[in-house]
Image: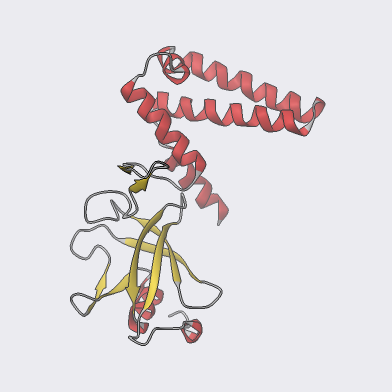
Amino acid sequence: MPSDSWIEQVRFGADGLVPVVAQDHRNGNVLMLAWATREALEKTAATGQAHYWSRSRRQLWRKGEESGHTQTVAEIRLDCDGDTVLYRAHQQGPACHTGQPTCFSTVITKDGAVATETEPGAHLLTRLAATIARRALERPAGSYTVKLLDRGVPKVSQKVGEEAIEVVVAANAEDGSRLVSESADLLYHLLVLLEARGVSLDDVLRVLEEREK
């Protein structure tokens, strides 16, 4: 069983609770905010499953115990003051009781309007992949992404190869700004290829995560 000495650094409120932010360990998406007692933190550390304290029901609860939408915690972090806890977790299914992937799906636009983002992602590549998927579904006129997808996997693959060569050339014979630009082109076209093949970016990130260990 892991040591719980770190819990001594947690600054619980007068009610014995500390706020816990849950974040997707793979894509960085902020999933939810809840509260925890010392026992909830101990249970999380001991089992690897996210535990919280329900202020309305006045009881300990494990995320997903009824819905099946569990959170397997890969890492626990404390903020600099010790008064907020971060669970970096693998979310099974949607995190929100509304069925949204995150409880933070309501977006306040620049003009003050309220909108709902169905596939929010903190990581830029995750957001870009979601945008490409929407282009494939909605097929707006004049979209370069749609034109690429309409050409099929062989042509998109060829484009990825061309962009890869340009990255190599930039790395060996051009300045850093050119390498940055060509690398951006390569990443974009690779995401389009994944969409064309029906492969999820999350699957790629999962492999990279396994290699990180």
The residue located at (69%, 22%) in the rendering is 166
Q: Is 183 situated left or right of 119 in this image? A: right
The foreground one among 39 and 100 is 100
For the rendered model, the colour scheme is secondary structure
Residue 167 lies in quadrant? top right
Name the residue: 44% across, 34% down. Answer: 129
User: Residue, x 76% and y 30% (percent of image)?
Assistant: 171
Is 201 situated above or below 83? above
Residue 15 location, quadrant: bottom left
- Residue 187: % across, % down: 56, 31
125 versus 163 height, above or below = below
Count of number-bearing discs:
0
Residue 160 higher or lower than 202, as above or below:
above
Which residue does the image show at 35% across and 85% down from the upper left? Answer: 16
In the picture provided, is 6 more to the left or to the right than 21? right
Is 32 left or right of 25, judged from the image as shown? left
State left or right for residue 44 relative to residue 80: left
Front residue of 194/124: it is 124
Question: Is residue 93 depicted above or below 181 in this figure?
Answer: below
Q: Quadrant of the C terminus?
A: bottom right
